[in-house]
Amino acid sequence: MIKKIVLPTILGILAFGFWISPNFKEIAAGVAIFLFGMLFLEDGFRAFTGGALEKILAKTTDSLWKSISFGVITTTIMQSSSLVSVITISFLSAGLVGLAAGIGIIFGANLGTTTGAWLIA
C-alpha cells in the first residue's frame, strides 16, 4: 500500500522539480550517481565476504575500543572522515562488520578528523 503511494509521489516531486528549476536536474543527477556508486561499492564488498578482508575486519573490530581505534587510524591516514563513513556503511550493508563495530568506526572517524589539528598544535 505504501509503496504504491511513495513511488508516484517521489516521481511527481522530481517532475515538479525538473519543471521549476534547471539546476534541480544537476542536483538530482549528482544524487543519482552517488547512490548508483554506493550500490556498486556494496556489491563489490559483498564479493569479499569470507575472505581475508572479513578476517582482518573481524580481528580489528571485535571490541568497541578496537573499532574506535580503527576509525581514528584510518581517518588519520586517509584524512577524510566522510570516506571512512561511506566505506563503513558499505561494510555494514555487505555484512562484513556488525552494527556495534560500525558505530565504533564512525565514532572513531569523527575523532580522527581532529588529529590534523592535534599534530599541528
Image (tube, grey):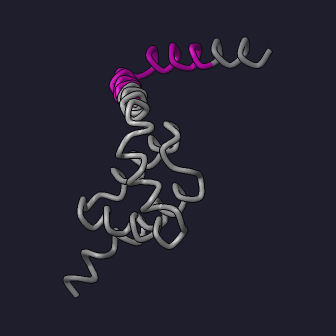
Percent x, y of residue 77: 23, 64
Q: Residue at x 39, y 65 (%)?
A: 70
Q: Is residue 51 left or right of residue 93?
A: left
- The secondary structure that most of the magenta stretch takes on is helix
Percent x, y of residue 21: 41, 22
Percent x, y of residue 74: 31, 62
Q: Is residue 12 left or right of residue 39?
A: right
The quarter holding residue 31 reads top left
Of residues 24 and 87, the one drawn nearer to the viewer in this rendering: 87
Quarter of the image with the C terminus is bottom left
Q: Residue at x 44, y 37 (%)?
A: 49
Vertical side of 9 occupied by 83: above or below: below
Residue furthest to the right in view is 1
Residue furthest to the left in view is 120
Q: Is residue 19 visible?
A: yes
Q: How many marks?
A: 0
Q: Magenta stretch?
A: 10-34
Question: Is residue 32 a member of the stretch shown in magenta?
Answer: yes
Of residues 46 and 79, the one drawn nearer to the viewer in this rendering: 46
